Amino acid sequence: MVAYQWPQQIRVGTRPSRAETEWSSWADQHQARFISLFPLFVNDTPANELIAEYYWENDAHWNEVGHAKVAKELLNQLVLPSAKK
């Protein structure tokens, strides 16, 4: 289970978000792994900078740079830890 944010949620900047809280609870109840991508995009960096760098202009989807950032994070959390065993 992965929770990710929309640009509107980055602008609001609330953590934990409702999505994080509800999906984390669901994952706990169903013994599912939970990953939040919110820390990648909801942090001390100004929202407008993050949105401009990682999202298509006037769109709620990641651009190539945003996808690369998310892919790296998922690899770090899912693939690389098991490779260290």
Image: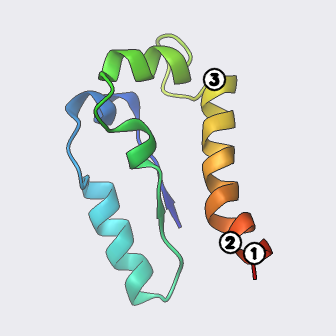
Residue drawn 33% across and 38% down?
A: 42
Q: What residue sits right under mark 1 in the picture?
A: 84
- Seen as rendered, the residue at the extreme front is 84
Residue drawn 39% across and 47% down?
A: 39
Tell me the distance, in whole angstroms, between the alpha carbons under discs 1 and 2.
5 Å
Q: State yes or no: discs 1 and 2 in contact (Cβ < 8 Å).
A: yes
11 sits to left or right of 57: left
Q: Of marks 1 and 3, which one's residue comes earlier in the chain?
A: 3
Residue drawn 61% across and 43% down?
A: 70
Q: Could you tell me residue 11's position as x and y percent?
A: 26, 27
Q: Could you tell me residue 67's position as x and y percent?
A: 66, 35
Give the vertical position of 82 relative to 11 (above or below).
Answer: below
Q: Could you tell me residue 27's position as x and y percent?
A: 44, 78
- Seen as rendered, the residue at the extreme right is 83
Pointer 2 local density, CA inside 10 Å: few below 14, some 14–19, many at least 20: few
Q: Which label was assigned to residue 81?
A: 2
Q: What residue sits right under mark 3 in the picture?
A: 63
Quarter of the image containing the C terminus?
bottom right
The count of marks equals 3
Tell me the distance, in whole angstroms, between the alpha carbons under discs 2 and 3.
27 Å
Q: State yes or no: discs 2 and 3 in contact (Cβ < 8 Å).
A: no
Q: Nearer the viewer, mark 1 or mark 3?
A: 1
Q: Amino acid at mark 1?
A: Lys
Element marked by disc 1: loop
